[in-house]
Amino acid sequence: MNSELKHTTAYDYERKHNGTGPSVTNRSKIIAADSIKAEEIPTIPIDSLELVTSLQPTINIHSIDIASFRNLPTPLVVQPSEYRRSLSEWFQIWWEGIRPGYLSLSLLPILLGTTLAWTHTVNAQAPLGRLNIGHMIGGIVVASLIQIGGHLINDYYDHIRGIDTGNRLSSGGLIQQRYIKPTFVLKMGFTLLGIGTFLGLLFSIGGGILTYLFGGLIVLGTYLYSAPPHPLSSIALGEITGFIFFGPLLTLIAYMAQTSGSIPVSAFIYSLLPGLLATAVIHTNNLRDSETDTNAQKRTLAYLLGTKASRFVYLLLLSAAYVIVAILGLPPHTPHLILITFWTCPLLIIVINGIMRTKSPIGFHLVMCETLRIQLYFMLLLIVSLIITTFIPVLPHLPSHLL
């Protein structure tokens, strides 16, 4: 055998031994013989090799419990202090986990209902009106505790169902980033929800039977929004639930807490405004997460309608809020000053342009953030305008030391 091997193709070998020219079929054949010299061993053409992807390998899928954590043994050496999280770091982690940016959805309806009840008691005989500061602060605390508890419960059940597992745009992340054990997050959620419910019962004394009924609906709905077997958020009821809770229910509870249970029609109409804006925020959140929600079998309104129809729903929600303000503020002898809420129109143009042009999750996320800003500025301008409109006629009757 020669010391240096000479590699030839199957085509060269066949031409040498058979004396035939090349052909399409012959070039892809493998030559077999009883004895062949080493230097005449043919090589296999690359184009005759079968692709790996065409082999269709068998893949075995095994389900795992995503809610469980691997039990690690206790370390033999305690970590140095520089590797431990400080109190400020833990505070920052929990602060981001409770989603403070969304708290305006529940706090502003409380302020609106309180403002409506207060301004309805202002007159020449009582220029300062009647305002129960304790009930207002209590409503803010109760609404915050219930919403934060609902966020933590939602994080737990989303983790169990595999929702938002790889979604970096979603807020929270106490469980997804392995900061806190899932069971502890659930316990904290139920604890805050329970404390909020107890305080709500105390601050609702004297508000009437409807106050307890509306409060009970909010607590029950907060749990059912995320809890199995059929979460409201997964059967296309997330938007309607948010509209009812962050609109009429919270606003009217705050109103009744100040007036011992009476509800005028005007208070109900004003309560639609925070509900519409909050629903727009929830809808853009579902648009942003529609891809990951679909993979996790979460059926939201955005999933059922599709992107084009969901854009129309978003525009309808925002437009309805501005139309209601125009109806309340344009006719004669109405609080015209509430029309200053239209100062948010520059932001409105931005979100309309964004919702119509974007197709990516990050684009919908930016629209949602801007919608939260609209909700904040719109509601604050509305509350301030109601207060100014009420006190302008009674300025001559105010005590001199207040002027």
Image (spheres, grey):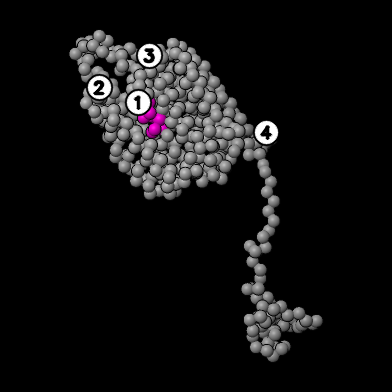
Whether label 1 touches label 2, CB < 8 Å? no
| SS category of the residue bearing label 1 | helix
Range of residues picked out in magenta: 269-278
Where is residue 215? Give x, y as percent. 48, 20
Residue 208 to residue 68: above or below: above
Q: Main structural element of the magenta stretch: helix, strand or loop? A: helix
Quarter that holds the C terminus: top left
Task: Give residue 270's mark.
Answer: 1
| SS category of the residue bearing label 2 | helix
Looking at the rendered image, the disc whose residue lies closer to the viewer, 3 or 4, is: 3
Q: Residues within 10 Å of mark 3 (few under 14, many from 20)?
A: many
Report the front residue among 217 and 133. Answer: 217
Give the residue number, with chain letter if any, for mark 3: 259
Residue 193 counted in the magenta span: no
Residue 54 to residue 167: above or below: below
Give the residue number, with chain letter if any, for mark 2: 389
Where is residue 225? Give x, y as percent. 53, 31
Mark 1 vs mark 3, CA separation in Å: 16 Å
Amino acid type, mark 1: Tyr
Residue 273 counted in the magenta span: yes
Give the residue number, with chain letter if any, for mark 4: 74
Q: Residue at x 80, y 81 (%)?
A: 34
Residue that protrudes farthest toward the top in the picture: 125
Where is residue 85? Give x, y as percent. 54, 32
Q: Earlier in the sequence, mark 1 or mark 3?
A: 3
Mark 3 vs mark 2, CA separation in Å: 20 Å
Quarter that holds the N terminus: bottom right
